[in-house]
Image (spheres, helix red, strand yellow):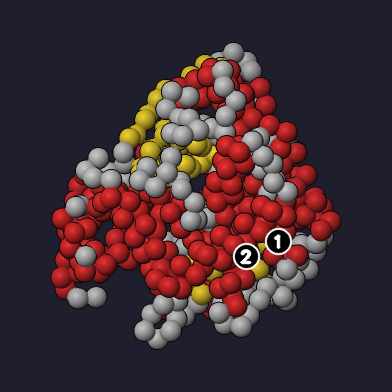
Amino acid sequence: MDQFTQKYIEGFMGDVIAKNPGEKEFHQAVREVVESVAPYIIENPQLLDQKVLERIVEPERIIIFRVPWTDDRGEIHINRGFRVQCCSAIGPYKGGIRFHASVNLSIMKFLAFEQTFKNALTTLPMGGAKGGSDFNPRGKSDAEVMRFCQSFMTELSRHIGADTDVPAGDIGVGGREIGYLFGQYKRLRDEFTGTLTGKGLAWGGSLLRPEATGYGLCYFTEQMLATRGESFKGKKVDISGAGNVAQYAAQKAMRLGAIVQTLSDSDGFIYDPEGLTEEKMAYVFELKNIRRGRIKEYAQKYPSATYYPGERPWRIACDIALPCATQNEIEKADAENLVKGGCICVAEGANMPSTPDAIKIFQGAGLLYSPGKASNAGGVATSGLEMSQNSMRQHWTAEEVDTYLRRIMSDIHAACVKYGTEADGTVNYVKGANLAGFIKVAGAITDQGLV
Ligand code: NDP
Ligand code: 2IT
């Protein structure tokens, strides 16, 4: 990179850091994009003049609100709710809602920023947003979760709508929470629209939306592997997380012939060298989605598995790693372990799970590495398909949705190859995804004038 470009990046980041102090996840996400797109911006001075990047890093709107609720004993709790509406240049704001104790403004802003580029990559007309709360759903009763969701939606309902902003799930928000949120929205607005996605099948949901992020991740990974004449067949796969994305990534990878050897939660991970089977997966679905148990119970049920408390899966040698838990869950030492263990491909199911140092290790070692905004876009893409079905008042078959999902993942892969192929023929998926997403959003922003 030449000195001028380097200076532009540092100047831009200096301004972002000064204006958004302490928001380290947001700085991290912005830096990654700016490093990818700076040469393109410098070659296209109208983007500099139009301050396109400056506009994208300033969310169009941020809503922060109080969420009061009572627990089952009648005690009052106050949580903080967020909705960051980052960019509506290419469609209504779209992005998930996260309920997790760690949620803060920095995390919401990084997720909304990432979502803007991810949604552009899907080829569907969706802007970028994210929302959530520092509410911790762990250990709460259904009634407590319902009261919290109703209180959260009472405020959020003023700011969303089928043509304005369409939330969905993320960490801590699955089918149960979307149900409570949708019920309250409908009650307040007296209208049945597709304002949330991830809905139940009987009330406007799309077939395959629960599976879409994990399945899409595996479709994308297949394409990455194919560039080197490889496939999932017989490969050892490490997966982190045991939630929505991890479960369906594990199921699809297993069905494609891989040996899925790990799953995790924030307390530790399980290693099953014999790999997951359909029967073991059915147990995991029941454990996590019905009983809401912990992953260590897997090792009690299956003696072939060992539970490692307080650790992450990355010390277990594998061919393919699919991080599907949370941001910054692969640090430098984890990345070094993966490379040492012979890993050939890291495809992100979570948002920003690899730290910048970890990414450098992967890229330096010549691994196939793809950022979440490309490889996990199947979830929001299928949300887009749910919106289409709602608007048309139609319900597509699983085969129809799967065909769209495969095509979209393949188109995203093609965009990464188009914009990310380096002089030596290797594909830099970070550069490819960021540049492809940016070019689309930047074009829409300049077309629409200074708004
Ligand atoms: P879930 O809540 O269903 O599952 C999250 C999993 O990750 C749980 O096993 C959880 O363990 C673990 N986890 C969460 N936070 C931490 C943490 N701080 N440290 C270690 N483990 C943690 O969420 P999803 O599967 O929906 O989301 C997982 C990731 O995928 C997130 O990064 C999300 O943004 C991303 N994503 C989700 C999409 C979707 O459609 N749902 C779409 C695209 C990306 P525990 O139970 O201990 O908290
Ligand atoms: O990070 C993500 O892409 C999601 N949590 C899914 C968002 C959506 O609107 O389906």
**Secondary element at image label 1:** helix
Residue drawn 57% across and 22% down? 191
Report, in whole angstroms, how far the alpha carbon at label 1 lies from the one at label 2.
Answer: 9 Å
**Is 194 on the left or on the right of 371, as rendered?**
right
Q: Are marks 1 and 2 in contact (CB under 8 Å)?
A: yes
Label 1 crowding class (10 Å Cα cut-off): few <14, some 14-19, many 20+?
A: many
Residue depicted at 50% across the width and 36% down the height: 166
Q: Position of residue 97 (x, y in %)?
A: 51, 38
Quarter of the picture holding the N terminus: bottom left
User: Dividing the picture into quarters, in which one does residue 427 lie?
Assistant: bottom left
Quadrant placement of the C terminus? top left
For this orientation, the residue located farthest to the front is: 392
For residue 69, say whether it is visible: no
Q: Name the mark on residue 219.
A: 2
Dot 2 falls on a residue whose secondary structure is helix
Q: Which mark is residue 252?
A: 1
Q: Is residue 141 left or right of residue 4?
A: right
Q: Where is residue 321 in the image (x, y as percent from the top left)?
A: 59, 67
| Residue 48, visible in the rendered structure | yes
User: Foreground: 65 or 73?
Assistant: 65
